[in-house]
């Protein structure tokens, strides 16, 4: 009898272990099924669904969405009351109509010539006789046509040689040659500016660029354009370094990063590398930074080691290194939080819409401040009064919702991403200059994405660094509302004078945020007037004096 009882107990123990093991297996399989369903829903949306993150305004009384903000209970009744009070005051952003569809040298012999004659400074032509000329021909470009700029420097010899010996005058006088963007190079500033604009502003790679000058009468190869491209990037690099210093000297920057394929010649394939963007809100300037294609935390620390102030970024772990720095305050990005929660609408619509309602109300506060054109101080006060309780309630909703979802589900991952960023989000409540999201830095990345899509990859790391240089300068022009063609034409022609060893000129005068005013008050370099479009092959002649 005792043996039978012991046998039954052993059997029960084994069955209990089997049941426990099966229950654990079922739970793991259930989590796997949820994760696979979430991945399938995400894939279906990417292939068949809409890519836009926009959603209609959420109304608490909407019978199609029967839910409230969540079960906060009586734990935080005061916060819930403050949130309801703020929600009543907030003016929702009105809906606008949808976007209307969008509507559909020997080689220079046949080109028109613009001649610029440079006479020597303070020369008494009564004592000198002209004995020859020195010609320097450069290829220039204006919209729709090419022309040759012929810089003529007459050579004069003194009539009375004894007077030259007695008074220490030179026997032969020629005006100095203006400094060229490329030493002894054929392209002028306008041609180089057009190459850079076509490649990085209009995203036309070299193999397509060569067709345009061919149609205009000059046949150039890709190697020729590439040979011009490298030295002009080196010419602009000192200005790029000044731009980096100025951006990092501000007290509020936005940082992000994106991919940039670069050819790995050892592996004979394009490697997935990264390029960083740093944008200053005031002054409105930005720069791109390429560090051997790395996205590591060490790159971020080295890049921003001199920075002090507000650093706005997403939840990428590389920025966690700045948590312990007392002179840097990390600011979160609500758009990234929204993006993670919005991706859960197919998996868990109820919780996703609850989270999006909080975020929508926070954005409506910003809309109210924009509509009222509030100052920075008034905007901060409005945020503390309305957005503060909303942010507190959103944090509690994240706390209460997380135990109700699977940690491996999309919603679980979204909450795990959002919750640690709430303390960073609070900084924007107390400074009206700080934006609620990092969208302006992401928008500044769009030209880089278009360039990447058209050129496919950078040929080597030097090409990637040159891309960072030019995109930084053109992006800053866009931020400052400066015409990039006019800016490049002017800056490329002036930089050789600024970079001479004895020059007292400051490179910061050429940065886009200061260029306009400085150009109007200090522009003394000679410029060539436009050609007649009625007769584009007319030879124009302009005389200037060397200074």
Image (tube, rainbow, N blue to C red):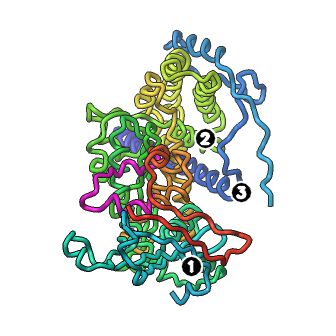
Q: Nearer the viewer, residue 429 or 421?
A: 429
Provide the secondary structure element on which disc 2 rests: helix
**From mark 1 to mark 3, how far is it between C-alphas?**
35 Å
Q: Mark 1 — residue? A: 207
First in sequence, mark 2 or 3: give its number. Answer: 3
Q: Mark 2 — residue? A: 342
First in sequence, mark 1 or 3: give its number. Answer: 3
Q: Position of residue 509 (x, y in %)?
A: 39, 48
521 horizontally vs 198: left or right: left
Which segment did they paint magenta? 491-513
96 horizontally vs 349: left or right: right
Q: Mark 3 — residue? A: 48
How many residues crowd mark 3 within 10 Å: few (<14), some (14–19), many (20+)?
Answer: few
Q: Quadrant of residue 535?
A: bottom right
Q: Residue at x 63, y 39 (%)?
A: 348
First in sequence, mark 2 or 1: give its number. Answer: 1
């Amino acid at each position: 009898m005792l043996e039978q009882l012991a046998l039954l107990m052993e059997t029960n123990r084994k069955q209990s272990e089997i049941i426990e093991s099966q229950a654990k297996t079922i739970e793991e399989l259930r989590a796997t099924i949820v994760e696979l369903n979430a991945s399938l829903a995400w894939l279906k949306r990417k292939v068949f669904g809409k890519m836009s993150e926009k959603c209609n305004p959420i109304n608490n009384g909407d019978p199609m969405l029967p839910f409230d903000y969540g079960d906060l209970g009586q734990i935080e009744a005061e916060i819930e009351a403050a949130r309801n009070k703020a929600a009543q005051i907030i003016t929702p952003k009105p809906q606008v109509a949808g976007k209307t569809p969008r509507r559909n040298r020997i080689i220079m012999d046949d080109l028109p010539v613009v001649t610029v004659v440079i006479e020597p400074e303070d020369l008494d032509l009564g004592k000198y006789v002209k004995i020859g000329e020195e010609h320097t021909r450069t290829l220039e470009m204006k919209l729709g046509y090419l022309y040759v700029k012929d810089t003529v420097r007459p050579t004069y010899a003194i009539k009375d040689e004894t007077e030259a010996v007695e008074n220490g005058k030179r026997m032969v006088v020629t005006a100095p040659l203006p400094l060229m963007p490329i030493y002894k190079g054929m392209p002028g500033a306008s041609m180089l500016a057009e190459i850079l604009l076509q490649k990085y502003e209009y995203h036309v790679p070299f193999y397509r660029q060569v067709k345009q000058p061919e149609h205009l009468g000059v046949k150039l190869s890709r190697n020729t354009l590439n040979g011009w491209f490298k030295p002009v990037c080196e010419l602009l690099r000192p200005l790029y370094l000044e731009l980096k210093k100025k951006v990092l000297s501000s007290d509020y920057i936005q940082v992000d990063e994106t991919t940039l394929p670069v050819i790995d010649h050892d592996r004979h394939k394009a490697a997935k590398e990264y390029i960083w963007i740093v944008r200053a809100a005031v002054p409105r300037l930005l720069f791109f930074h390429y560090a051997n294609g790395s996205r590591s935390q060490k790159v971020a620390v080295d890049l921003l080691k001199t920075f002090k102030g507000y650093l706005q970024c997403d939840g990428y772990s590389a920025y966690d290194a700045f948590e312990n720095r007392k002179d840097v305050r990390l600011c979160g990005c609500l758009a990234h939080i929204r993006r993670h929660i919005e991706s859960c609408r197919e998996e868990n619509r109820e919780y996703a819409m609850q989270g999006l309602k909080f975020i929508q109300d926070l954005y409506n506060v910003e809309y109210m401040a924009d509509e009222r054109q509030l100052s920075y101080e008034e905007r901060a006060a409005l945020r503390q009064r309305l957005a503060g309780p909303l942010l507190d309630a959103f944090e509690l909703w994240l706390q209460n919702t997380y135990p109700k979802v699977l940690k491996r589900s999309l919603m679980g991952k979204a909450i795990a991403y959002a919750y640690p960023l709430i303390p960073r989000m609070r900084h924007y409540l107390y400074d009206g200059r700080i934006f609620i999201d990092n969208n302006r830095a992401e928008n500044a990345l769009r030209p880089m994405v278009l360039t990447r899509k058209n050129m496919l990859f950078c040929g080597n790391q030097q090409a990637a660094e040159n891309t960072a240089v030019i995109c930084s300068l053109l992006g800053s022009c866009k931020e400052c509302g400066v015409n990039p063609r006019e800016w490049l034409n002017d800056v490329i022609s002036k930089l050789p004078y600024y970079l001479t060893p004895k020059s007292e000129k400051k490179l910061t005068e050429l940065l886009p945020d200061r260029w306009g005013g400085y150009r109007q008050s200090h522009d003394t370099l000679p410029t060539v007037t436009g050609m007649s479009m009625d007769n584009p092959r007319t030879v124009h002649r302009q005389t200037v004096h060397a200074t």
